[in-house]
Amino acid sequence: MSALNFENEFFKGIEQIKFEGPGSDNPLAFRYYDAERVIGGKTLKDHLRFAGAYWHSFCGNGADPFGAPTHNFPWDVKSEPVARAKDKMDAAFEFLTKMNLPYYCFHDLDVVDYGLDIKENDRRLQALVDYAKEKQAQTGVKLLWGTANLFSNPRYMNGAATNPDFHVLAHGAAQVKAALDATIALGGENYVFWGGREGYMSLLNTNMQREQDNFAKFLHASKDYARRNGFKGTFFIEPKPCEPTKHQYDYDAATVLGFLQKYDLMGDFKLNLEVNHATLAGHTFQHELQVAADAGLLGSIDANRGDYQNGWDTDQFPNNINELVESMLIILEAGGLQGGGINFDAKIRRNSTDPADLFYAHVGGMDLFARALIIASEILEKSDYKKIRTDRYASFDTGKGAEFSAGKLSLEDLREYAIEKGEPAVISGRQEYMENLINRYI
Ligand code: XLS
Ligand code: NI
Ligand code: NI
């Protein structure tokens, strides 16, 4: 990381965040995230691959449906769009560097405002890509993934790739092409498709089959274009069950898995799983991780959390250690994330208005993930967690159980076995024992 010297400094008075250990009382220091510490043969930095999210951190101004912005960003004042965007990028790279975040993620519209002229938009994005290249070279910060915002412009009110109007779909494609070009030019390691408004509000006016077929064609065209132009990374689909549409097509991990299989996209696409989206789907985050891991699709994470009392994507910063330890157990057992990292798709609250609040939020999130990883790795190494789960299925490892697993027993064979052995013994699932085990290591 370069020496901290920012010509156009926005977060004055905040220095680089350092690791000070669990005993520190400095609120702007890491207690657990010691980037170079090695766990299971890999540094924390390489395990976690943290990323800052451009949209929440540098664009999200605290506005809500009931009120005007509360975060009045000093980088958001110039009138000319490219000059304003460069100020924002200065702020972004200053923050990423001070925060020790090795990666960032963006939508095209986060980086620079778009108008209605496609060629002019491409020109603006290109100007910022050139600028970002310099910034990346100066700071060593890298692009974890790029994406296109195909949901904010009013033309996308009925979706982009699933819009009933072909003309709108073509506009979405123009945006994806430019966002892919930007991602490739910046050495982006992955590219994300989050469903945006790909879904429906009412089936009364919707041909679901046709929309999903179009969605798949759109993804194939995007993938083919990117591959032809040298993109070697992974495409991620980010499931979400609802919001903004009533029903999003990429409902959850299992739904997207079926979609990828049906439309022959398994080779190039994996999943980017978001904590709050899992909650909205009525799942735990762990459930979504496990579905993805079992299918070989565990690509990346959008880190945040929901609110137990609210039914929408509140995108709060993570702070639940139990949930994250359980999640890390799944990620570690799966061999880690495939190509992705941990992107803080989270925003500070409307009334968190000090520049330092963004730092506190990330310090907390990064420390929590680091701590969860360290604990999960200890549980796997030192406790009987793995053994208990293996033993629970031992009856399938020998004798008739093993024959069944090998596909060798018929329904009649199974009946014979049941008669011969009589009533099965009662065997405890020991859930409370397992819950205590997790807490013992926390
Ligand atoms: C919205 C999504 C979005 C994606 C990127 O709920 O989480 O932020 O991560 O388009
Ligand atoms: Ni997200
Ligand atoms: Ni989200």
Image (spheres, rainbow, N blue to C red):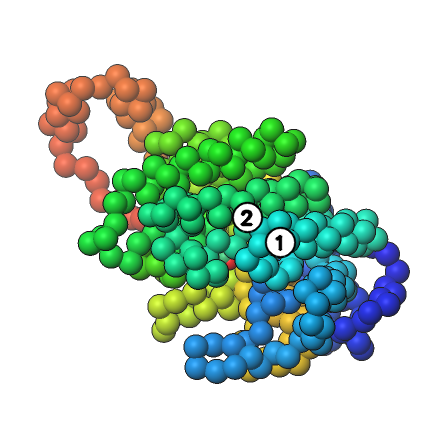
Give the residue pinned by disc 2: 175
Q: Does the residue labelled 1 lie within 8 Å of ligand 1?
A: no
* Residue 208 left/right relative to 141: left
Question: Between disc 2 and disc 1, whose residue precedes?
Answer: 1
Residue type at mark 2 is Gln
* Residue 427 left/right relative to 337: left
User: What residue is shown at x 72% (from left), y 54% (from top)?
Assistant: 128
Above/below status of 150 relative to 7: above
Q: Position of residue 331 (x, y in %)?
A: 52, 45
Which of discs 2 and 1 lies nearer the camera? The answer is: 1
Q: Which of 127 and 51 is in front in this view?
A: 127
Q: Where is residue 411 in the image (x, y as percent from the top left)?
A: 15, 23
Q: Position of residue 373 (x, y in %)?
A: 59, 53
Residue type at mark 1 is Asn
- Secondary structure of the residue carrying numbered label 2: helix
Badges 2 and 1: C-beta atoms under 8 Å apart?
yes
Q: Residue 121 carries which label?
A: 1
Q: Which of 62 and 347 is in front in this view?
A: 62
Q: Which of 431 and 203 is in front in this view?
A: 203
User: What residue is shown at x 12% (from left), y 25% (from top)?
Assistant: 415
- Secondary structure of the residue carrying numbered label 1: helix
